Image (spheres, rainbow, N blue to C red):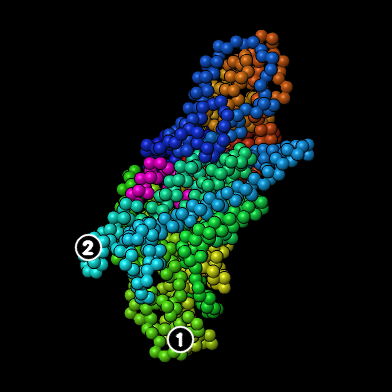
Amino acid sequence: MFQFWGSRTYSGAEGMENPGYCSGSFDGLHHPSDDDDDEMVDIAGATLDFSSTDDVPPLSSGGFEDYSTTTGSSSSRAAGMNGTRPSNLVDPLEDPLPGVGTYEDFNTIDWVREKSKDRDRHREITNKSRQSTVALLHSISDAFSGWLLMLLVGLMAGALAGGIDIAAHWLNDMKGGVCLIGFWFNHEHCCWTSNETTFQERDRCPQWQSWAELITGTSEGAFAYVVNYLMYIFWALLFAFLAVTLVRAFAPYACGSGIPEIKTILSGFIIRGYLGKWTLIIKTITLVLAVSSGLSLGKEGPLVHVACCCANILCHLFTKYRKNEAKRREVLSAAAAVGVSVAFGAPIGGVLFSLEEVSYYFPLKTLWRSFFAALVAAFTLRSINPFGNSRLVLFYVEFHAPWHLVELAPFILLGIFGGLWGALFIKANIAWCRKRKSTILGHYPVIEVLVVAALTAIIAYPNSYTRMSGAELISELFNDCSLLDSSQLCGYKQPTNTSETGAGNSLADRPAGEGLYTALWQLALALVFKMMITVITFGMKVPSGLFIPSMAVGAIAGRLLGVGMEQLAYYHHDWFIFKGWCSPGADCITPGLYAMVGAAACLGGVTRMTVSLVVIMFELTGGLEYIVPLMAATMTSKWVADAFGREGIYEAHIRLNGYPFLEAKEEFEYSSLAVDVMRPRRADPALAVLTQEGMTVGEVETLVESTHYSGFPVVVSQESQRLVGFVLRRDLLISIDNARKRQEGVVSASQVVFTEHAPTQPDDAPPPLRLRGIMDLSPFTVTDHTPMDITVDIFRKLGLRQCLVTHNGRLLGIITKKDILKHMAQIANRDPESILFN
């Protein structure tokens, strides 16, 4: 009974509970106009009414069943048409129909068919280019269009990222006060022109006033502290409320990180509206609000989603990308690289991130175009200069002190901590998200966000390290102490003689002072707070990235360990491990380096990134000489985390949401055969098939309306079951509906023919309907004794939606991607019904 299931095979209740990563608990969705140009498929010119598929897809269980009913009713009305034979027959092979070859929502594309379509299109353009100058110019413009699209994606994503950075910085500072010479200035810009700032209090100037100064006239005392505290909480709640309300009202798909869904879409899955213009607009606005609210989240993951939205919208300007889903996914892979490029100012790391972490199909051409797009985006961001420091990022380090081989031990220790934290975080976060989905908590997303925002603000404000934004915290932790630093982290005892001063602007290792001890206590408390609050924050109904919170946890742990190593080297420089390279008065240990390594280790433990993470980190910090420590910590964190489970956070969320994603990193280690997985099983009804001739339009429509499958095998006859081809349900319905409207005399009694030549019929018989043009004449098949590990590899490497199972050429059954995922879940003792989509 189980064949190639369609997009709406889940019930209405299931669809509302888990239609996607973050749209489960939203009711009363906003539906933009029908002429939306940002759907994942293009159905321009189709005669069927698809007006319900707008930017935000309906969450009911409509889909194929409703569509079949509509077609059935139209066919019954057409049944009384005149049965005279027309002079011309409509053949989809010779006269392509609008809508044929496109896909339904929540369905998987046919990679092989899409690549074949693109090759045919390219071959046709090449042949025509030899015939005329106009055709040659068209061929050149077609070849250049990919690079032009990459240029536009880079410019648009870079401009949006610069705007997000500036707006987030401004709103974050607004929680503390306002600039009197212009409310649109953030704290730093407000004090730039002031001549009254001092070295010790460089952030204090008369032009910038805290809320306590504005309301009470003084910035000192308990009452002023309470006023600032309350205003901080007020702004945090306001920003969080606006973010979750806008997401709920206009674009439910704008919440979360977006990377799990981007990975699924790049594997061939279709989620209409997820990369639409409403999602782009709302995600851009709410990302600024969510980051400014002080919640423990970052903007880096959502920027990948924003860049992919830009790419998807711009694809509609170019026909070859608008009409081909596989080509569009090449652009989206490049856009993912652009997202990381503008998030971290790391264009090379962005390309490697797309290759290692998110892309499913990444040909060499996409690598070059990703590199170009990431370059353009980084240049655009540099031109905007959002941080005012001529850098692409907020935390660029200035120190270049050498590290010693002995320090590899604490670096590996940080890697172990990162792996343990990553594994613990994934298990805790998935458990919390599952609880959110299965309990009443998921029905009140606004209240959940407000409660978490209030809790975060109340606990964060008293501690200066949790009060500042995540990027500012990481910047503080990465910095090395110099003679000009007034940070609490540089609260060492001053050197008693000049011989203890290191070369240049750096200082030799010194004993810790009271200021440093206070900072360490605050950092220890901040570490515990960040580790706990991030678990419940990631996955809420606001845009939320995981890069910055993970890096903050690792940077705190690394800085604590770095200061500990520094003090150990100062007081025990005669120990064996320090002899020969750490003499008294030398600058031996760099605590900022430990913070960098810890940040990489924790991010690697959570996401399981390796190569791309190391490149991102040295591009991010400029610390090219620290590649080996970063590599050691990142690899250690991956090994340790993999010991507790091979899934990264994004793969875990993909599985939680039931997306049909075959993870390339996961090995199939079981000895089952294709016959063990295929449908129908022994107790199931026989496979529903079409015969190549002998069936009428009415019989085909009855079969289609009585089943929910997305496609039907075509066989020679019901007796022989010899396989001829495979036809998709959507193409079948569109072809029949068009034939009834365009071909005179087609009625329910008309024969449906899939053969090359129509069979002879009596003169009084209605004309046949030839549908050979919509049939796949070379469907992928395996024999019943094919091992499942080979079958899984075929599905992964060719991006198949379904595969037919035969025995000596006779059709036995069908295997879909969903069947494989259910089989793998069953073997792993997970609920096979958790795979919701196909």
Instruction: Find residue 216 and name its label.
Output: 2
Answer with the quarter of the image where residue 488 lies.
Answer: bottom left
Q: Nearer the viewer, residue 499 or 598?
A: 499
Look at 43% across and 63% down and name the residue there: 471
Q: Position of residue 727 (x, y in %)?
A: 62, 30
Q: Main secondary structure of the magenta part?
A: helix
Find the residue positioned furthest to the right: 130
Tell me the quadrant of the picture where the N terminus can be found.
top right
Image label count = 2
Badge 1, how many Cα within 10 Å: few under 14, some, many 20+? Answer: many
Image location of residue 832, percent across then percent down: 48, 43
Compared to 402, does 149 lie above or below? above
In the image, is residue 241 part of the stretch drawn in magenta? yes
Q: Nearer the viewer, residue 26 or 314?
A: 314
Give, as a three-letter code, the residue at label 2: Thr
Q: Is residue 360 visible?
A: no
| Residue 639 on the magenta segment | no
* Mark 2 residue crowding within 10 angstroms, few (<14) / some (14–19) / many (20+): few
Callout 2 secondary element: helix
Three-letter code, disc 1: Thr
* Image disc number at residue 501: 1
Identify the magenta region.
240-260
- On the question of residue 246 being in view, the answer is yes
Q: Position of residue 813 (x, y in %)?
A: 60, 34
- First along the sequence among labels 2 and 1: 2
